Image (tube, coloured by chain):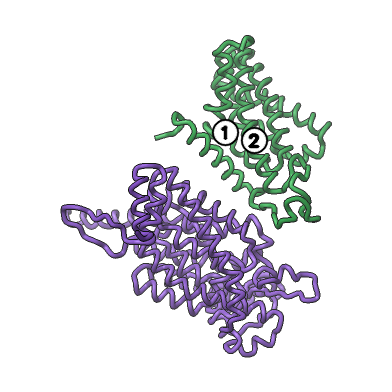
Chain colours: A green, B purple
Amino acid sequence: MGLLSKKDAALITDPFADNNPITIQVLGICSALAITAELKASIVMAISVLFVMGVGNIVISLMRNIIPSKIRIIAQLIVVATLVIIVDLVLKAFQYELSKTLGAFIGLIITNCIIMGRFEAFALANGPWRSFLDGIGNAVGYGVILILVGFFRELLGSGTLLGYKVLGDPIEKTGVYAFGYENNGFMLLAPMALIVVGIIIWIQRSRNEALIED
Amino acid sequence: MGLKQNLHNLKEKYKGTKMAPAFNAIHTFLYLPNETTQGGTHIKAADDLKRTMNIVIMALVPCLLFGMFNAGFQHYAAIDGSLRTDVLANFFTFDNFWIGIIKVLPLVIVSYGVGLIVEFIFAVIKGHEVEEGYLVTGMLVPLIVPIDTPLWMLAVAVVFGVVIGKEVFGGTGMNILNPALTIRAFLFFAYPTWMSGDKVWVYDAVNRTGTADAISGETILGAYAQNQEVVYSTFDKFMGFIPGSIGETSTLLILLGAAFLIFTKIGSWRIIVSTFLGAAVMGFIFNQVVAADIITESSKFYGLMNTVWWEHLMIGGLAFGAVYMATDPVTASQTNKGKWIYGFLIGFISIMIRVFNPAYPEGVFLAILLMNVFAPTIDHYVVQGNVKRRLKRAKVKTA
């Protein structure tokens, strides 16, 4: 890590594993449940949040000395909202179908607790470079879980990955469907997303003694 | 050197190692262990967990045997309707039982095999003894699924039910949800085409769809939900000569099982009675709604609302759920007053789901799972109410 000092590198790697926003801090669960039925939507969501968090953290960090603390929440909201609108318009322009699938959830990035949480906890107290790294780290930690959940839900629920029929055709009965395999409809329902996230949390905590509470 | 001695030696050899629980479980399951406690005074209770579980299994055996005959009967009766004219003569035949053997026994074996493997794995990882809890679950599961359920689906569901329904909470005795119903719910939501409709309840109906030999067997609930005429007599419904999940059709045998459970004090009569009561009350309310002309015959709820309230108690899985599922001592309410509330709401909600959601004509498993979640809350308020009442009494006396 010649590019980053050890302290700076930890900003990126910590949220990735031992301080993951979803599995350890249990933030941003709503979007993890809502849009992970398809892998593509998960990936787009992860990239959107990556953009909003990286840029947002820099902007807030640059403005941190001129934002009066009494109205800082509204100032943060304006910054997030601006960035989210940019994402929304870009998606509408280049990925119209996908933006319809994601629907309100892109708009709801504004209320994603991870973003506000990082603004409050980090960007308001640190310089732009470190804030940027922190934002990227948390967004990647969030995105990895999203993509992981999306992967299993789409594979087991629809038998596809990114829309490709990797398990064969369920109607033509090719691939594994020839042996009587069926898609698991439960995987497409929101409760199963919660269970998948729960299983990830379970595996992560049982592998790391330090994370076990009480 | 018999098997018993061999097992004992294996047990001694692996004592203190990770595999110990596995050998201990096989040993105590098959034999009375050699070890006896030394010194001191001991009270030996006969009603340990193993015996409790065995009694429930005994109560389930008639349902299982009947289900095996019924599997064959429904199959042949769907092909040749004239068999239904003299049910008793055509029911207990070897042909019927043979279909039961080839279709039902594999379900039982898969359910037990997969479930016990999961239990063994968790016992070895967590280093505790294998618990007897799965003995009953393993028997309940094949009885509450349709006859044509593919075996791999059952295996997947059993793994999910045992791990998510029981082991994550800490194993038998710590589970919030009834594992057998968790398995059923998983199957229902994951593979709805195999769990509902008019093709899954009769052996071979799925394969014959679209051919000249097509057969079908709509359950009574399914027929009512679609406002169809129901062909079965009250006698058929009570005796269980109807399509349905494997073990839940015969209300008579379920009531005999209930009597046995109540007599041996394994099942709570409060829960059983209050569940039937709750269902009857809800059914009666719906009957009054129909009688008062609040809904018309064209309403999609008409068929099930118009069902006489006592008939609701015999069709679908209500009786089976009330007797074998709701009474699960781990997931039910513990206080006596709580049991009445718990059971009543199960019956009440079951019929409500049944009537209002034609997509889930079998509302019993959802109602029981819902009340499983609320059982600790009910107990909490019953206990708090008792504490408050006694505190009040104490104050009056000191004043």
Identify residue for label 2. Answer: A146
Residue B355 visible somewhere in the drawing: no
Nearest to the observer: residue B86 or residue B311: B86
Q: Are marks 1 and 2 in contact (CB under 8 Å)?
A: yes
Q: In terms of image quadrants, where is residue B314?
A: bottom right
Identify residue for label 1. Answer: A22
* Residue type highlighted by circle 2: Leu
Q: In terms of image quadrants, where is residue A97?
A: top right
Q: Position of residue B224 (x, y in %)?
A: 65, 74
Give left or right: position of B260 versus B244: left
For mark 1, give the secondary structure: loop
Mark 2 crowd level (few <14, some 14–19, many ≥20, 10 Å Cα): many
Relative to B361, say whether A3 is above or below. above
Q: Position of residue B392 (x, y in %)?
A: 25, 55
* Residue type highlighted by circle 1: Ile
Disc number for residue B151: none
Nearest to the observer: residue B25 or residue B198: B25
Mark nearer the N terminus (1 vs 2): 1
Q: Quadrant of the N terminus of chain B?
A: bottom left
Nearest to the observer: residue A102 or residue A185: A185
Q: Residue furthest front?
A: B1
* Residue shown at the point (75%, 55%) measured from the top left: A178
Q: Position of residue B293 (x, y in %)?
A: 64, 76
Name the chain letter of the residue that bears numbered label 1.
A
Q: Quadrant of the C terminus of chain B?
A: bottom left
* Residue shown at the point (59%, 34%) measured from the top left: A28
Give left or right: position of A162 versus A31: right
* Residue shown at the point (71%, 42%) measured from the top left: A38
Relative to B83, say whether A52 is above or below. above
Residue A36 visible somewhere in the drawing: yes
